Amino acid sequence: MAALRRDKLRGFTLIELLVVIAIIVMLVSILLPSLNRAKLLAKMAKAKAELRGVDSSLHVYYIDHECYPPVRVDCNADMRGHEYQLPVELAQGGYLPQGNSLQTMVAVEDPFSPDHTYKYNAPGPLVVNNAFHEKGNDLWLPDNFPQDPGDDLTKARGEGTLYNDPKLCPVRWVIWSVGPGGPDSPKAASQRCPTSSRTWYDPSDKQGIICRILGSDGLIHLSP
């Protein structure tokens, strides 16, 4: 009886433990890519849904003010990386929730860039270090927008046109997430971003921005 009890109380052998660990490692290696893809798709879905909400806010703002809010940039070191953040006017008017710092004046955070809002760009008014300029902001577009010449992204802006007059520009505004790869990825950091389709998200390399563009014809252009 004593021997029988000892057999029942016997634990795993070292070989059995190693086999169990090997099986767990194998299962994790199989499941991890699927989990990472699911997380990526969830972030992308969140970004697209929130950009749609920002679009609606800009639409209502335009109805109320007959113009779109100005673009903001700041030369201060602590604002580096926060250029083109969502307009504070959207928060001040109650169109979007208000943030609690100069870096995030609107509380709508880009899931691919923590502590940063989505980005906004438009031809026309520009606020630089709190100084207002009526037609101070240029928006670059490829000459055949919404198509793209497909030039090397490392080249300076060319084969396109800079617009600072909203009445002449084929685009009213652009809002975007820096997308997979983050703000320092080659596409998000390109001088052709965000209106060049070459900077938009591409499933083949899993990088690029997620954008929403309102054309002067009222049509919305989307990245894939």
Image (cartoon, rainbow, N blue to C red):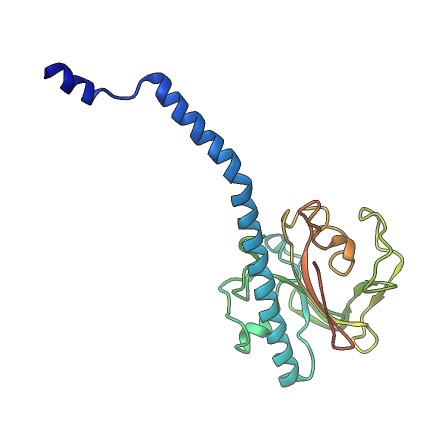
Quadrant in the rendering for residue 93: bottom right
Percent position of residue 39, x then y: 53, 49
One can see residue 103 in this view = no
Percent position of residue 159, x then y: 89, 58
Quarter of the rendering occupied by the N terminus: top left
Give me the residue at 71% from left, 46% from top: 204
Please name whichever residue, 183 or 15, is drawn nearer the observer in this view of the structure: 15
Percent position of residue 86, x then y: 61, 66
Q: Is residue 139 left or right of residue 49?
A: right
Residue furthest out toward the top: 3
Figure check: 154 above or below 166:
above
Please name whichever residue, 75 or 187, is drawn nearer the observer in this view of the structure: 187
Quadrant in the rendering for residue 205: top right
Residue furthest out toward the right: 159
One can see residue 104 in this view = yes
Figure check: 148 above or below 68:
above
Numbered marks: total: 0
Please name whichever residue, 88 or 127, is drawn nearer the observer in this view of the structure: 88
Q: Is residue 68 left or right of residue 109?
A: right
Figure check: 215 above or below 22:
below
Quarter of the rendering occupied by the C terminus: bottom right
Give me the residue at 59% from left, 56% from top: 44
Give me the residue at 64% from left, 78% from top: 59
Please name whichever residue, 66 or 112, is drawn nearer the observer in this view of the structure: 112
